Amino acid sequence: MLPVSRTLRLGALLTLPGLSLPAQAQNTVTLDEVSVVGDGTGAPPGRGGFGVTSPPGSAPSVIENPVGQIVTPISRETTIANRPATSIGSVLLDSPGVTVRQGNGARDVVISIRGNNARSTGVTKNTVVLEDGFVLTQPDGAARFDLVDPRAYSRIDVFRGPQSALFGNYATGGAIAFRTRMGREIDGYEIGTDAGSFGYLSNYFTVGGVSGPMEISLFASDVRANGYQDHSSYNTQTVNLLASYTPTPDNRFTLKVINNDLQANIPARASLNQYRINPYQRGCASAATAAPGCVVYTFANNGAFGATTPVTAGEVGLRRDDRRTIVALRWEHDIDARTTWRSQVGFDERNYDQPFYTSAGRGSLPSYNVLSDITHRSEIFGLPAVSYAALSFSALDAHATTFNLRPLAGPALGALIGDQTAVQTNLGGRARTELALSPDWTGVLGISAENTTITGENRAYAYSAAGRTVTQALADRSFLNVAPELALVYRPNTEWAFRGRAATGYTTPAVGNLFVTPAGVPGNNTQLRTQENLGFDLGTDWTPWETLRLSVTGFYEFFRNELVSQSPGAGLPSYTFNAPASEHRGIEVAADWAFGPGWRATLAYTFDDQVYTRYVEQLSAGRFTARFDRAGKALPGVPAHQLLARLGYEQVGGPLSGVGGFVEVVAQDGFFIDNANSLKAPGYALVNANVHYVTDLPGGYAKRLNLYVECRNLFDRTYAASVQNLANGLGATTGLPTTAASLANVTGSIYAGAPRTVVAGMKLSF
């Protein structure tokens, strides 16, 4: 529960806290913050930082409650505790600005903030991801959510807008900070099981507690499903440990360990026309007997060149076998009552074996990151201030190989077509000051500078009857980026807060971006530049009474050299290019209203308009070459309108005490999937419904029982959950641009979302 709002006084920074109904109300409902302008003076009592309990007098972590940032906290009570949260995507929709796409198999989702990563269908980029203060984004900017099981978390904070001044490289869209449950929150152990449609089964347990200077929480889960598409079964296991040791009041140590193993069958991505005919790719066991609308690949019989055989995803057994392991340690030391120094180091190993679509990728990406920062409370010119400075270093040593696939069950590897080695390092520093200018005004000034170097080699192999040819691409790039930030918050009273912010972000190309050509094959793409954006936010938070909170934010962001990914077609790997200039502008609305005893309404709405302002695309085919001015065209992959609206009720008291439920609508506008804006993916509106029951169990061994059942996509709508952008082209014989009808037949784009799905579960707390 967040603290009750209070009037700002000189000597403390601004607080925009949670709200609760008066104590004498029949039912007590606590509203979480829908936007934070922060105070920087500390977390809620008993929690001074990420994953460790620090004394109330110690200096807070700067990302615990930063002034001027646009942040939406998502709480466990409203989004996780009483529902079968099968992936993190359904949870994050509570924040405006968030777009969710189905990833490649299992519970993998691709998250975008303000449309910054909406064009990706593989990994999450342009967003820094943290857990308990430790960075989960690897040094190449990639973050995956396979390892994220929503049941492990007590709260998730979504930072929206350019954040490089606070988080460094890759924060052009924002950041997501996960917080696992602390030992004292659990205080015992819990076991639970969820089961539902399409063979879904999740077994999990949590244990946690405090003993003297030690505090520990451990979460583990095993999740399996047959999948709602042909050839989409999976199983994944997750272990998540958070432990802290406080030998003295001034010294705290925190250990973080995460391990995730994933085995998933991968269905084919359909064209728009195939999606309309056979959205779930059923009846696609073999190419010879494939039903209408099945995606069929053609693989070279010898795995290199020559005669080919048509196959389906199930016929050859396309799949993913991945493992991710993270081990990190932090030491926090209070130098004095106003100053805290933190140092942490983390090791992150990502191994993957991914034979799916038209090739097989294998790689090992070990990385580590080091961060040392200091937070100090002081006075500047007699005004209260919280100052922060940090130095960071991260490195990735990658080796990846790519093979053709052969038309045999297995899947069977063919010839080697790519061999890539690379080292990427990021070295940077950042500083920030939050200054209470008066009882009503708070200012923020921040800046970061970071140097990124990428050195590597890619060998691309091509085969013909004449033999093998080798093409070598070398990368030796260095990027120096600087990101300032300025924010101002005005709070005349406890009902109103007004905020303005100007901030910058940067994202350097990743190693993988440099070695995939526009043809979708391994090769030279090393000319890519850093993506940069300058964003302006204006917003207000209005709390007319304790049961209503409304937040409205307008944003306008100017991008230079925006990194845009799209597919060249037919299941080929996506390639990345720089769009010289573009603009993103929109409005975000969040509301939480406890309008009657037990009743609560939640709203998260985003309007996001993104257009190219300077980009000339050159297309070639055969003897033809043409240039097309895309200025004024919408960026592909970004829906203009998104909405989550939820109405819930919780019964407190009486014979039905503990019974609750909600109905929610998730809606998304259609969007273009090509630069010429000739083809559009359909929008959708889905209805989800939930009923749950929570009761304490007095006098027994168990303390609490949770029962719940949820139906997602209640009206069984067919919708596109993931759409890969497609490259425009020219006719090889006519030189004319490809038509919308032609693009609608290009495979490798669409995954259908889940049909009507029912999942029920129970949890016992001891």
Image: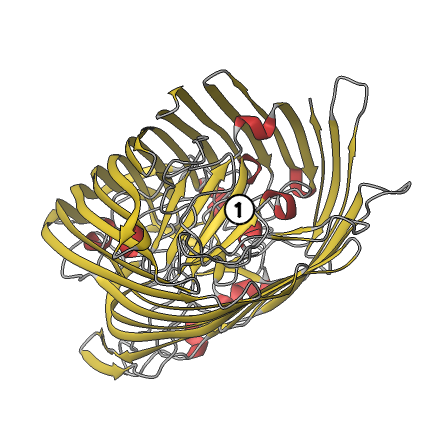
Q: Nearer the viewer, residue 241 or 249?
A: 249
Q: Where, quadrant-wise, is the N terminus in this rendering?
A: top right
Percent position of residue 319, x then y: 44, 40
Q: Is residue 511 left or right of residue 332?
A: left
Few, some or many residues within 10 Å of mark 1 (<14, 14–19, 20+): many
Q: Where, quadrant-wise, is the C terminus in this rendering?
A: top right
On the question of residue 541 being in view, the answer is yes
Write the residue at 32% across / 37% down: 413
Write the residue at 38% across / 36% down: 58
In the image, residue 431 above or below residue 685: above
Write the residue at 57% across / 54% down: 5
In the image, residue 682 above or below residue 293: below
Q: Nearer the viewer, residue 562 or 21?
A: 21
Q: Is residue 37 left or right of residue 667?
A: left
Percent position of residue 497, x then y: 49, 66
Percent position of residue 43, x then y: 47, 42
Outermost residue on the front side: it is 382
Image color mode: secondary structure
On the question of residue 525 being in view, the answer is no
Task: Place residue 761 in its image quadrant.
Answer: top right
Q: Nearer the viewer, residue 702 or 103?
A: 702
In the image, residue 394 above or below residue 245: below
Q: Which residue is mark 1?
A: 88
Under mark 1, the amino acid is Ile
